[in-house]
């Protein structure tokens, strides 16, 4: 009998009333789908609260201990859901990463799932239990608790669906995936379906409705992911690929924005030092995203690039090795504004339309990167709202 993996996000398990509502829904669903595995996030804003608590002690909490702290949030919600299901007369059992050997590798705070031993889950399902699993966490080679990165419970759910050969349903606080964040543009249209590639781009570029690595996994193993509202009645969005999609692609499927980066501009950099600078940055594991540089004049050039805001200080120190202090400028008020659509591959004139709209609305584009299915522009954060509105008026159709 097929397995259904459901995931409930933080706002969906924020208090005991909400947990009870979910439990009632699960009991109803079990009548038609007896094998249910539920992945939960931490209750409400618990994870933020724990991060703030650690940071009230030190700016840079030890990463191993921070993971140990954060993982407790999901343990509470998993056991609370199992307690509630049992109280409502439904057999339920919760498991954490240790109990299931959710094996991870890589760094604390952004570890990757290598494998999950699903034997215990399978046994419990065979015995008629609803199985509740802690999202967002794993155990590494040293036997230490790791976390997968913010929003990582989506990835836990897709990984379990892969291992259990099951369906994957993500329940959250909106009706599905929209053209853009419905909180930023109230008239954004909900999408019935979206291609893996497009969802992956949108998620990587700031659409936090899905953890981007969950989409990578889903695409790799061909798992269709349904996104809908917790206890909602409106039909949500299917994330899927290729032959199951409509024949023609839309030119622009969605817009994502991110304020997570700053831009750094270095003037009068000796052209021979460019590669050394970027090597230094890479050696510190700082991820550079958008880059542009001017043509060299007398062997000197200007280079601009974006990096995550919390890595700016470290990056400035590196840059100062190669130029004087006054030649390094930081802009913390930038927004990465991205338009994504598979139809861009075979439609010309999209970029010119985008730039025309920016120009007509006096929005200055500071940096640009493109791929076959995406245009990303760094703009001033103060222009974000207008940019969303104008681009939605043009493309949200
Ligand atoms: P959960 O706690 O359930 O994982 P998240 O807060 O991580 O929920 O993700 C849901 C939020 O994602 C929504 O409340 C919405 O504001 C935001 N979001 C951003 N982009 C989109 C989009 N394109 N479609 C739907 N929601 C989006
Ligand atoms: N609780 C974690 C977070 O807030 C994981 C998740 O919600 O997916 O990031
Ligand atoms: Mg989330």
Image (cartoon, rainbow, N blue to C red):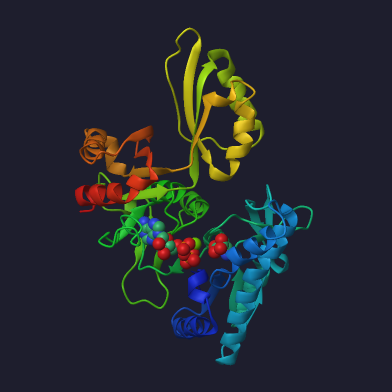
Give me the residue at 57% from left, 39% from top. Answer: 312
Q: Position of residue 300 (x, y in %)?
A: 50, 13
| Residue 154 left/right relative to 136 | left
Give me the residue at 45% from left, 10% from top. Answer: 297
The one nearer the camera, 119 or 199, is 199
Q: Is residue 186 visible?
A: yes
Please tell me whether residue 199 is drawn above or below residue 358 in the rendered image: below
Please tell me whether residue 224 is drawn above or below residue 82 in the rendered image: above
Residue extending farthest front: 326
The one nearer the camera, 15 or 350, is 15
Q: How many marks?
A: 0
| Residue 284 left/right relative to 264 | right
| Residue 171 left/right relative to 56 | left
| Residue 31 left/right relative to 75 | left
The image quarter containing residue 49 is bottom right
Please tell me whether residue 14 is drawn above or below residue 345 in the rendered image: below
Q: Position of residue 341 (x, y in %)?
A: 31, 44
The image quarter containing residue 48 is bottom right
Q: Position of residue 70 (x, y in %)?
A: 66, 63
The one nearer the camera, 35 or 58, is 58
Residue extending farthest top: 298
Q: Is residue 168 visible?
A: no
Q: Position of residue 392 (x, y in %)?
A: 25, 51
Residue extending farthest right: 142
Locate the C terminus by quadrant.
bottom left
Give me the residue at 34% from left, 48% from top. Answer: 384
């Amino acid at each position: 009998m097929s397995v259904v993996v459901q995931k409930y996000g933080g706002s969906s398990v924020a208090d005991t009333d909400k947990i009870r509502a979910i439990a009632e829904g699960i009991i109803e669903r079990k009548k038609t789908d007896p094998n249910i595995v539920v992945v939960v996030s931490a209750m409400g804003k618990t994870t933020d609260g724990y991060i703030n608590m650690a940071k009230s002690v030190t700016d840079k909490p030890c990463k191993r201990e921070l993971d140990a702290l954060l993982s407790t949030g999901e343990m509470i919600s998993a056991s609370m859901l199992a307690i509630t299901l049992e109280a409502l007369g439904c057999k339920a059992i919760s498991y954490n990463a240790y109990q299931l050997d959710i094996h991870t590798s890589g760094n604390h705070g952004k570890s990757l799932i290598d494998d999950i031993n699903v034997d215990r889950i399978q046994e419990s399902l065979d015995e008629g239990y609803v199985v509740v699993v802690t999202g967002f966490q794993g155990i590494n080679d040293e036997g230490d608790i790791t976390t997968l990165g913010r929003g990582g419970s989506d990835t836990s759910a897709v990984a379990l669906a892969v291992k259990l050969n099951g369906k994957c349903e993500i329940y959250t606080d909106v009706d599905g995936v929209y053209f853009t964040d419905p909180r930023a543009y109230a008239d954004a249209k909900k999408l019935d379906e979206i291609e893996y590639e497009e969802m992956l781009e949108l998620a990587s570029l700031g659409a936090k409705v899905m953890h981007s690595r969950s989409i990578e996994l889903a695409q790799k193993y061909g798992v269709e992911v349904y996104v809908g509202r917790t206890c909602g009645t409106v039909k949500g969005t299917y994330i899927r690929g290729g032959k199951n999609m409509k024949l023609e692609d839309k030119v622009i499927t969605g817009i994502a924005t991110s304020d997570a980066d700053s831009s750094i501009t270095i003037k009068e950099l000796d052209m021979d030092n460019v590669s050394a600078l970027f090597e230094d940055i890479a050696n510190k594991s700082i991820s550079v995203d958008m880059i542009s540089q001017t043509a060299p004049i007398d062997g000197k050039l200007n280079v601009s690039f974006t990096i995550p805001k919390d890595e700016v200080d470290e990056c400035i120190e590196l840059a100062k090795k190669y130029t004087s202090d006054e030649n390094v400028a930081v802009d913390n008020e930038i927004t990465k504004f991205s338009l994504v659509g598979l139809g861009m591959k075979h439609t010309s004139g999209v970029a010119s339309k985008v730039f025309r709209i920016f120009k007509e609305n006096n929005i200055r584009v500071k940096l640009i990167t493109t791929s076959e299915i995406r245009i990303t522009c760094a703009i001033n954060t103060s222009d974000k709202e207008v940019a969303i509105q104008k681009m939605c008026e043009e493309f949200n159709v």
